[in-house]
Image (tube, rainbow, N blue to C red):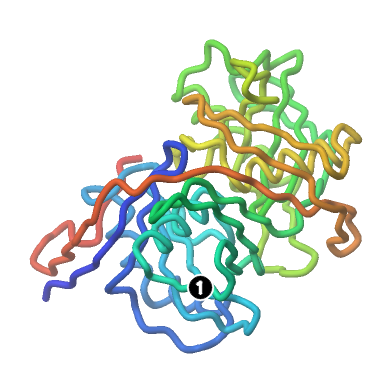
Amino acid sequence: MRRSFFCIDSHTCGNPVRLVAGGGPLLPHVPIAERRDLFMRDHDWIRQALMFEPRGHDIMSGAIIYPAYRQDCDFAVIFIEVSGCLPMCGAGTIGLVTAAIEEGLVTPRVPGRLSIETPAGRVDIEYEKSGAFVDSVRMFNVASYLHAADVAVDIPGLGRLVVDIAYGGNYYAVVEPQETWKGLDGMSASDIVDLSRGLRDALEPVCDPVHPEDDKIRGVHHAIWCDKPSSGNADGRGAVFYGDKAIDRSPGGTGTSARMAQLHGKGRLKVGDTFRQESLIGSVFEGRVEAEADIGPFKGIKPSVGGWARIIGHNTIFVDDRDPLAHGFQIK
């Protein structure tokens, strides 16, 4: 049997986003967080087939859109990527909104605005258009917060490292320059991957955060290595690590949110402040602290992140049962 998936491929500030516009599985009309669980249980082969090689690669990410369960949302989304189905993805949101609007997949109730039901909660969107094209997207992300400050761990090949744990839709280990780590200059991609894996392993037994409002969101699976910007167009630069060996080419939407939450939690950002985050390739997201927020017992922020995406093509992908590599593969 051969199954077909119609996809719209784009990139958000350099990071790929594959929007599955046709061929996604039918799921019950329940909250999208529950549909995400059902997708992972019964249809994870679709994620693997579309994200892994030979149809994808180590930093592939994507999304499948569904009718919203919530009455206050325009549509719902399940995020798919190499490491699984994330509760939230900022770059993915900017890419899918751009593709969905330009290709006519969704009709906003209010032009220039959308509300999306994500597994992490409702995410509001503002976008700007020139004619038929979307110029920019601003995402009003889920409430974000500093979960733990100054967590010390020992990293093989590096030594003692002190990090903060912050939530911006996913939990991040936030690393700033210090005695044992001087910054991003001179670091190769393999250095970032190796150190991030070591950091994640070291954190697991000492810090296992659980979201106070959703216990299905737990664990530190991402890291962001922060440094000074390379130009005057940004306030900071970050290398976002996720999955097994992925480094985000964009500045990272949830990463930028987590970084702002960390800075706010340490008194270095206040409501109304902006923070422009630069990626490793020089693209920039503009973050802004919109308001303060309570997340269970934690004090945090409501962040927004602005960026852009461009469609790069239409793609009809076949998954053929005769193919011994039908469901993809990874080299680890």
Q: Quadrant of residue 153?
A: top right
Q: Residues within 10 Å of mark 1 (few under 14, many from 20)?
A: many
The residue sitting at 54% across, 80% down in the picture is: 68
The residue beneath circle 1 is 36
* Residue 129 in the image: above or below residue 276: below
Give coordinates of residue 39: x percent, y percent.
43, 74
| Residue 102 picture location, percent across and down | 38, 59
- Whether residue 102 sits left or right of residue 264 in the image: it is left
**320 vs 305: above or below:** below
Name the residue nearer the viewer: 234 or 56: 234
Q: Position of residue 141 (x, y in %)?
A: 67, 56
- In percent of width and height, residue 4 lies at 19, 70
The amino acid type, in three-letter code, at marker 1 is Arg
Q: Name the secondary structure under disc 1.
A: helix
Looking at the rendered structure, the number of numbered marks drawn on it comes to 1
The image quarter containing residue 139 is: bottom right
Residue 273 position by quadrant: top right
Is 311 located above or below residue 19 in the figure? above
Q: Along the horizontal axis of the image, is 288 left or right of 9?
A: right
Quarter the C terminus occupies: top left
Identify the residue at horizontal 24%, vertical 61% (top origin): 327
Query: Among all residues in the image, which is located at the extreme left?
Result: 322
Relative depth, front residue between 3 and 95: 95
Viewer-closest of 327 and 152: 327
User: In percent of the image, x 69 and y 50: which residue is there?
Assistant: 304
Residue 220 vertical placement versus 191 (above, below)? below
Is 56 on the left-hand or right-hand side of 197?
left
Determine the residue positioned at 48% across, 46% down.
Answer: 135
Foreground residue among 282 and 159: 282
